Amino acid sequence: MNEQQQFVRVRELANEIIRFKLQDRAVYNEVELRNSVELLARSIVDLANVHLKEDADPETSLKATVCKVKMVYNHMNQKAKQQGLEGAYQEIQDLKSYAENEYEQKNLLG
């Protein structure tokens, strides 16, 4: 995955997290929220460093950023599933499928 694709993937995952959170009825404890906020904040720092060209290995940093954001997404997704929010869970799956299809189409086209 090239740099542009990694940036797009981070954006897609972040948008999914935002959409999920807006419709979320799951309850999170303070530790879970702290961990998620820390991962997202570290991702922002990594992205800023890459953008400012202050990162010695931007490719690895971008891969790590995608992983961090994906971890937050997966945790929120799992939490919704555990709490029996089937409607929210299905919507997340639909959004994920849509994002993956868009991502694949962009890769095929360009």
Image (cartoon, grey):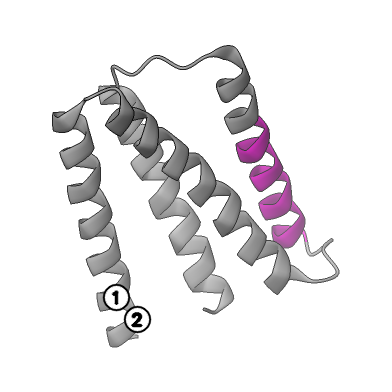
Q: Main secondary structure of the magenta part?
A: helix
For the record, the magenta segment spans: 38-52
Residue 8 position in % (x across, y down): 45, 62
Q: Is 30 above or below relative to 48?
A: above
Q: Which residue is mark 1?
A: 104
Specify whether 23 is left or right of 31: left
Q: Is 77 above or below relative to 82?
A: below
Q: Secondary structure at mark 2?
A: helix
On the image, which quarter does residue 89 sit in?
A: top left
| Amino acid at circle 1 | Glu
Q: Which residue is mark 2?
A: 107
Q: Is 93 above or below relative to 34?
A: below
Kindly indicate whether the residue at mark 2 contacts the one at mark 1 (C-beta within 8 angstroms): yes
Residue drawn at 62 percent across, 66 percent down: 63
Residue drawn at 62 percent across, 19 percent down: 31
Residue drawn at 28 percent across, 33 percent down: 81
Q: Nearer the viewer, residue 34 or 51?
A: 34
Q: Secondary structure at mark 1?
A: helix
Q: Nearer the viewer, residue 63 or 86?
A: 86
Q: Can residue 29 be found in the magenta stretch?
A: no
* Res 13 label: none
Q: Can residue 46 be found in the magenta stretch?
A: yes
| Amino acid at circle 2 | Asn
Spatial separation of the CA atoms under disc 1 and disc 2? 5 Å
